[in-house]
């Protein structure tokens, strides 16, 4: 084969190759040859390229940095220069090029020029950039998700772990290199938290596993309940190249589900207890009412039956008041009327409230008061409620003939009250939740005197509102209980009124002036009884059982006072109040009497024009005092006049 043939063949190949721009440069970088592929790639016809410096193919930035001459110098020193970089076409567009410059030397080793080869790899560059961007997005996604992700090769060796997986397992990314999945991802029996028995761990397989719940033992020994599944990573031929394991910590979710289940159970037990507690007083009330309705009782038995009704109604009212108090506290609607108080007087008042229960169960009550002053800043009514609730609990949960101790002492700028009993006690596991709502039903189900399980929750809330603390202690069932409340103590020199609550209670005021009153209520029994009471204390009372009848009566004569139920059969009490305001020039005093006791109900009544708001069953003392302050107009008001 002649040199001429080889030379012609090489020239032909250079001419016909389509992927590479091939051209020769002299030692200064001027273009000597220009193949068709170079013309197509660069956009310059050979006539424009020949004789020009090859730097015209570089970007403006590369030219400013003198890259063309640097590349030639590198090739001259090292025989070759290679790089991947942006190159510029005639129209100014850029393409990603794989460039090689080869130094050409003669037989003596002297430099005679350069051969430059360029390949357009723009499509490959774009693909690589997209893949890199996808990798970054995937990594950011894997970091952001709450799931742990681990990839494993076919030999079961860990290849990758995201941040959540590292957190849950306790292994860092560097530490897991060369470790098997069983060592890093340690699964144990989900139903044996203290067992060392291992559960089936992840395996490298060709099938996607169903999601299952397991227990993951971390590197430090801590345990996490997880939901996990695994899926094969396919190769090009479809065979698995490894496995990806995805798992999520559900420990907190399980705790929340357990708490919700417990709350639902306690709610159901509370509703059952509420029904029980309301039926208890209804039985004697119903029996006493039936006896009174017979009309055959003498004065003594009739009084006894009436006393039973009064006593049981007060008990039912107390139950409802407790419910409302808890609701108001939870919504922040209770406002404390703060004053300087002597806690010794508060304890005395609370004992007076609970004494009938204590005496009825035959308990012995011992009271020990500290000799030092015990002044606090607090709401007198609420502080009495706190102590009375604790005493009530002690009396109810102590068998008849038991012993109750009340101790008051001062320590560390606090006034503390301890109420102890030798009653049924509290199991250790129940003590942390004894101040939770409805927890009473957990203590005993066969107690003679009930409660709704909200008393201690109310105590805790009221104590916290006084910036105090409350705690309980019991050695267990059958060993009694001790509850302690501590309230910040006032300085001994703080002014404290020296008076007892009982001294401030006024007698029930009798009407010194006769008022005309329209009482509107669709409950006939309730309205009859309230009419009887108001008439007894000296007022003139007319009844109406519908809003229509009430407006007809007012059209005939306007009363001094209207006491209106809110829920009427033909209209609401709010609408009736607004109609009375519109139709009567002589504006009567409007009093709402209703079973709705929320703050929004009071606001709505005020907007409707009511002057006062009472919640059923009405506090008759409060109603009598309210009426005592109403000036009469001297008119008579009777239906039909």
Image (cartoon, rainbow, N blue to C red):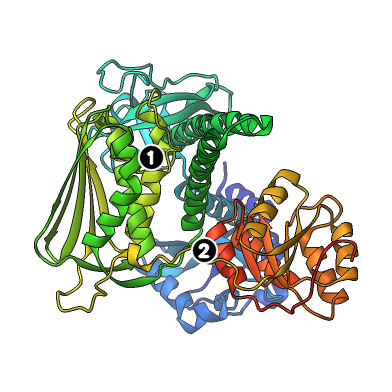
Image vertical order of residue 205 relative to residue 227, above or below: above
Q: Where does residue 257 sit, x and y in percent of width and height?
A: 48, 34
Q: Nearer the viewer, residue 491 or 537?
A: 537
- Name which residue lies at 51% across and 76% down: 29
Q: Is residue 609 left or right of residue 121?
A: right
Determine the image quadrant of residue 194: top left
In this image, 34 relative to 359: left or right?
A: right
**Which image quadrant for residue 584?**
bottom right
The reply to whether residue 346 is in sight is yes
Residue 629: image location, x then y, percent: 59, 75
| 475 versus 12 height, above or below | above
Q: Residue at image x 9%, y 61%? A: 371
Q: Mark 1 or 2, which is nearer the eye?
A: 1
- Horizontally, residue 220 falls left or right of residue 439, namely left
Whether residue 18 is visible to the viewer of this picture, yes or no, is no
Question: Contact, CB < 8 Å: mark 1 with mark 2?
Answer: no
Q: Which quadrant of the view contains residue 534?
A: bottom right
Nearest the eye: 585 or 41: 585
Q: Nearer the viewer, residue 521 or 302?
A: 302
Query: At x 44% / y 72%, what residue is drawn?
Result: 72
**Residue 189 location, x and y as percent?**
34, 18
Tell whether 536 sits left or right of 106.
right
List the residue tagged with mark 1: 165
Is residue 516 positioned above or below 119 on the image? below
CA neighbours of label 2 inside 10 A, class few (<14), some (14 to 19), many (20+)? some
Mark carried by residue 115? 2
Q: Secondary structure at mark 1?
A: helix
* Extreme-bottom residue of the structure: 64
User: Which callout, 1 or 2, points at the residue further toward the start of the chain?
Assistant: 2
């Amino acid at each position: 084969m002649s040199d001429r043939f080889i030379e012609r063949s090489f020239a032909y190949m250079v001419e016909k190759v389509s992927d590479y721009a091939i051209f020769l440069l002299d030692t200064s970088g001027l273009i000597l040859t220009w193949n068709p592929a170079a013309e197509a790639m660069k956009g310059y016809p050979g006539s424009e390229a020949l004789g020009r410096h090859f730097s015209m193919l570089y970007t403006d930035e590369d030219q400013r940095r003198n890259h063309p001459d640097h590349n030639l110098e590198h090739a001259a020193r090292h025989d070759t220069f290679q790089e991947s970089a942006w190159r510029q076409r005639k129209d100014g567009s850029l393409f990603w090029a794989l460039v090689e410059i080869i130094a050409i030397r003669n037989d003596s080793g002297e430099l005679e020029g350069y051969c430059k080869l360029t390949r357009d790899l723009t499509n490959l560059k774009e693909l690589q950039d997209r893949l890199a961007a996808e990798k970054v997005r995937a990594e950011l996604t894997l970091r952001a998700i709450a799931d742990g992700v681990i990839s494993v090769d076919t030999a079961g060796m860990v290849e990758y772990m995201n941040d959540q997986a590292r957190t849950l397992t306790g292994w860092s990314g560097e530490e897991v290199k060369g470790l098997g999945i069983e060592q890093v991802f340690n699964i144990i029996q989900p139903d044996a938290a203290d067992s060392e028995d291992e559960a089936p761990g992840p395996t490298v397989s060709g099938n996607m596993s169903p999601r299952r719940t397991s227990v993951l033992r971390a590197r430090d020994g801590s345990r996490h309940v997880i939901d996990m599944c695994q899926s094969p990573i396919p190769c090009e031929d479809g065979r698995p190249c490894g496995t990806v394991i995805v798992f999520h910590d559900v420990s907190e979710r399980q705790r929340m589900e357990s708490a919700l289940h417990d709350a639902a159970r306690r709610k159901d037990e509370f509703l059952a207890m509420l029904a029980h507690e309301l039926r208890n007083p209804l039985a004697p009330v119903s029996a006493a009412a039936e006896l009174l309705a017979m009309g055959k009782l003498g004065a003594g038995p009739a009084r006894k039956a009436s006393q039973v009704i009064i006593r049981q109604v007060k008990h039912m009212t107390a139950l409802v008041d407790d419910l409302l108090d808890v609701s108001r506290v939870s919504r922040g609607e209770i406002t404390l009327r703060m004053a300087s108080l002597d806690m010794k007087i508060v304890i005395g008042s609370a004992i007076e409230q609970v004494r009938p229960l204590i005496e009825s169960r035959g308990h012995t009550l011992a009271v020990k008061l500290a000799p030092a002053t015990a002044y606090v800043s607090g709401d007198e009514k609420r502080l009495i409620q706190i102590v009375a609730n604790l005493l009530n609990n002690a009396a109810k949960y102590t068998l008849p003939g038991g012993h109750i101790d009340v101790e008051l002492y001062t320590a560390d700028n606090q006034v503390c009250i301890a109420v102890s009993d030798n009653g049924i006690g509290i199991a250790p596991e129940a003590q942390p939740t004894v101040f939770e709502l409805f927890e009473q039903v957990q203590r005993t189900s066969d107690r003679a005197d009930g409660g709704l399980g909200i008393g201690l929750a109310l105590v805790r809330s009221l104590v916290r509102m006084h910036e105090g603390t409350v705690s309980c202690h019991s050695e267990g069932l059958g060993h009694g209980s001790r509850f302690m409340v501590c309230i910040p103590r006032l300085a001994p020199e703080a002014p404290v009124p020296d008076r007892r609550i009982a001294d401030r209670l006024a007698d029930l005021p009798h009407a010194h002036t006769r008022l005309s009153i329209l009482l509107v209520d669709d409950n006939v029994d309730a309205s009859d009884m309230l009419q009887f009471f108001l008439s007894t204390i000296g007022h003139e009372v007319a009844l109406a059982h519908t809003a229509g009848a009430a407006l007809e009566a007012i059209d005939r004569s306007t009363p001094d006072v209207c006491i209106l139920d809110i829920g009427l059969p033909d209209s609401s009490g709010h609408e009736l109040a607004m109609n009375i305001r519109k139709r009567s020039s002589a504006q009567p005093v409007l009093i709402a009497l209703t079973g709705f006791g929320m703050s929004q109900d009071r606001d709505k009544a005020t907007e409707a024009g009511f002057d006062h708001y009472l919640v059923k069953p009405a506090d008759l003392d409060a109603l009598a005092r309210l009426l005592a302050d109403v000036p009469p107009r001297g008119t008579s008001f009777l239906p039909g006049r």
